[in-house]
């Protein structure tokens, strides 16, 4: 059965999901701010900003944000976290009461809110979360990918699972919205740390240590906020963390590599076409951890490197010289 779906956000991940849904035979419109992307998708089946060399499904349509159609009941939300609150207000009349799946990963700076919580504060609708190890480019190239969808309503999770899944994109389902969101958001911060470590040639031992202890930090915050332990052992936890920390397509890993080369965060962001959510999430997670008294040393060091100008080598020394302790996740 063909579904009518709006994808709001025309970056790399929004484009990949819109193309996937069009490949699955659905009536898909992607809404973007950049008029050049609207024209390139409609006239040439290309997103010339993010995927200039990859042809998109010819049935995929694009419109400008100002032309959002309120008749579309099913919405894929891919607006960056820090712009989500203002965008909800902008599109309120068009998206209220709709079936929304949130594919954005991050924590809002200043409030410590996850994206689904921002929505719940500002809008009445049905919400699901999509997360897991998934580089947008590989999805567009039809590489095998497995992710998870979370909803408190089985019918909604099954709906999104059904319309997203195909021979190369497999979707599992869960009810742990909090766990999916936190895993997807916090892994970006750990990926920056791993990128810094790799950029400084600290080696594979250091990388493995950061990933493993990073997972402990993610899990610690997740359990404190009511998420399920098993979620962090799955696709949106360990799976997404490993991919983002080790894959060369990872924007957050690339940020870490460039920090290690001596570039400032302002210089790095100035030439990035896509948002590296980990830069913002590092600040939001650091502040939330302080507020809730959660021990997150790797997140803390990434925050200090980005926002306080701390020397990454000093951060490594401080991490290694922390008091010796039992390997255990304590909440």
Image: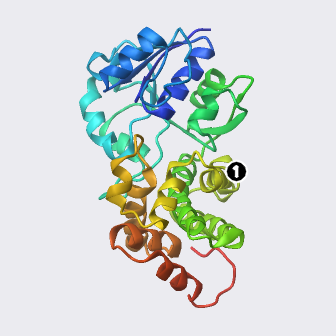
Horizontal side of 187 relative to 102 (left or right) equals: right
Can you say whether 105 is above or below 55 in the image?
Answer: below
User: Residue 154, percent across and down?
Assistant: 62, 32
Is residue 52 visible in the rendered image? The answer is: yes
- In the picture as drawn, the residue positioned furthest to the front comes out as 261
User: Residue 199, percent across and down?
Assistant: 56, 65
Q: Which residue is mark 1?
A: 234
Can you say whether 52 is above or below 317 in the image?
Answer: above
Q: Residue at x 60, y 63 (%)?
A: 219
Can you say whether 244 is above or below 116 in the image?
Answer: below
- The structure's colour scheme is rainbow
Q: Residue 289 sits in which quadrant?
A: bottom left
At label 1, counting other C-alpha atoms closer than 10 Å, the crowd grade (few under 14, some 14-19, many 20 or more) is some
Who is closer to the viewer here, 267 or 93? 267
Numbered label tally: 1
Can you say whether 20 is above or below 136 in the image?
Answer: above
Q: Residue at x 58, y 9 (%)?
A: 2
In the rendered image, the quadrant that contains the C terminus is bottom right
Is residue 101 visible in the rendered image? The answer is: no
User: Residue 140, percent across and down?
Assistant: 60, 27
In the rendered image, the quadrant that contains the N terminus is top right
Q: Residue at x 45, y 64 (%)?
A: 259
User: Residue 267, percent across and down?
Assistant: 34, 56
| SS at mark 1 in the image | loop
Who is closer to the viewer here, 7 or 310? 310
């Amino acid at each position: 059965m063909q579904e009518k779906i709006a994808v709001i956000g025309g970056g790399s991940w929004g484009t990949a999901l819109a193309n996937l849904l069009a490949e699955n035979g659905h009536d898909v419109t992607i809404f973007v701010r950049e008029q050049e992307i609207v024209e390139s998708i409609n006239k040439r089946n290309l997103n010339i900003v993010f995927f200039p060399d990859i042809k998109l499904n010819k049935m995929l349509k694009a419109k400008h944000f100002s032309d959002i159609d309120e008749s579309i009941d099913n919405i894929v939300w891919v607006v960056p976290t820090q712009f989500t609150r203002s965008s909800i207000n902008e599109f309120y009349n068009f998206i209220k009461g709709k079936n929304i799946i949130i594919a954005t990963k991050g924590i809002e700076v200043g409030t410590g809110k996850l994206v689904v919580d921002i929505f719940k504060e500002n809008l009445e609708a049905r919400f699901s979360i999509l997360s897991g190890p998934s580089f947008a480019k590989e999805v567009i190239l039809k590489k095998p990918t497995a992710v998870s969808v979370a909803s408190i309503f089985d019918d909604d999770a099954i709906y999104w699972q059904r319309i997203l899944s195909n021979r190369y994109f497999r979707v599992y389902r869960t009810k742990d919205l909090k766990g999916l969101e936190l895993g997807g958001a916090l892994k970006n911060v750990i990926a920056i740390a791993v990128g810094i470590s790799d950029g400084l040639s600290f080696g594979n031992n250091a990388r493995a240590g950061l990933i493993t202890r990073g997972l402990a930090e993610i899990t610690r915050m997740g359990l404190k906020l009511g998420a399920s332990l098993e979620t962090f052992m799955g696709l949106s936890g360990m799976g997404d963390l490993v991919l983002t920390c080790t894959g060369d397509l990872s924007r957050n890993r690339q940020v870490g590599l460039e920090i290690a080369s001596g570039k400032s965060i302002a210089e790095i962001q100035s030439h990035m076409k896509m948002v590296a959510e980990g830069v913002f999430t590092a600040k939001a997670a650091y502040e939330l951890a302080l507020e809730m008294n959660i021990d997150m040393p790797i997140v803390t060091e990434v925050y200090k490197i980005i926002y306080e100008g701390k020397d990454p080598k000093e951060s490594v020394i401080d991490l290694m010289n922390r008091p010796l302790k039992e390997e255990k996740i304590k909440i």
